[in-house]
Image (cartoon, rainbow, N blue to C red):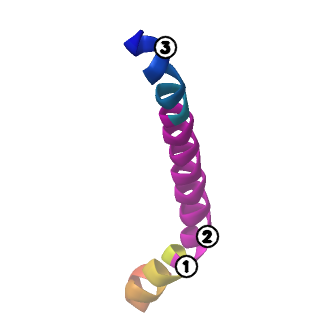
Amino acid sequence: EWGRVIAPYVSMGLNLVTTLLMVVLIAAAVDRFLARPAQETADAAATPVASRT
């Protein structure tokens, strides 16, 4: 009886958790993709000119 009452909430919670995980993974991938060029330029600017040649 309890399982029949809880089942919809459990499935709803799992659906929410999986959706949140997908959103977090997509956001992390987008953030990494967007931050890569800026990070490269920052590293290039941080290195001295002598070591860059």
Q: How many marks?
A: 3
Q: Nearer the viewer, mark 2 or mark 3?
A: 3
Between 3 and 39, the one nearer to me in the picture: 3
Residue under label 1 = 38
* x and y, in percent, of residue 15 in the image: 57, 34
| In magenta segment, residue 22 | yes
1 and 2 marks in contact (CB < 8 Å): yes
| In magenta segment, residue 33 | yes
* x and y, in percent, of residue 47 in the image: 39, 83
Name the amino acid type tagged 2: Leu
Residue under label 2 = 34
* x and y, in percent, of residue 23 in the image: 58, 52
Separation of marks 1 and 2 at Cα, in angstroms: 8 Å
Q: Residues within 10 Å of mark 2 (few under 14, many from 20)?
A: few
Residue 6 sits in which quadrant? top left
Q: Residue at x 55, y 79 (%)?
A: 38
Separation of marks 1 and 3 at Cα, in angstroms: 52 Å
Specify start and end residues of the magenta stretch as a single range: 13-38
Furthest residue to the top?
A: 1
Residue under label 3 = 4
Separation of marks 2 and 3 at Cα, in angstroms: 46 Å
Name the amino acid type tagged 3: Arg
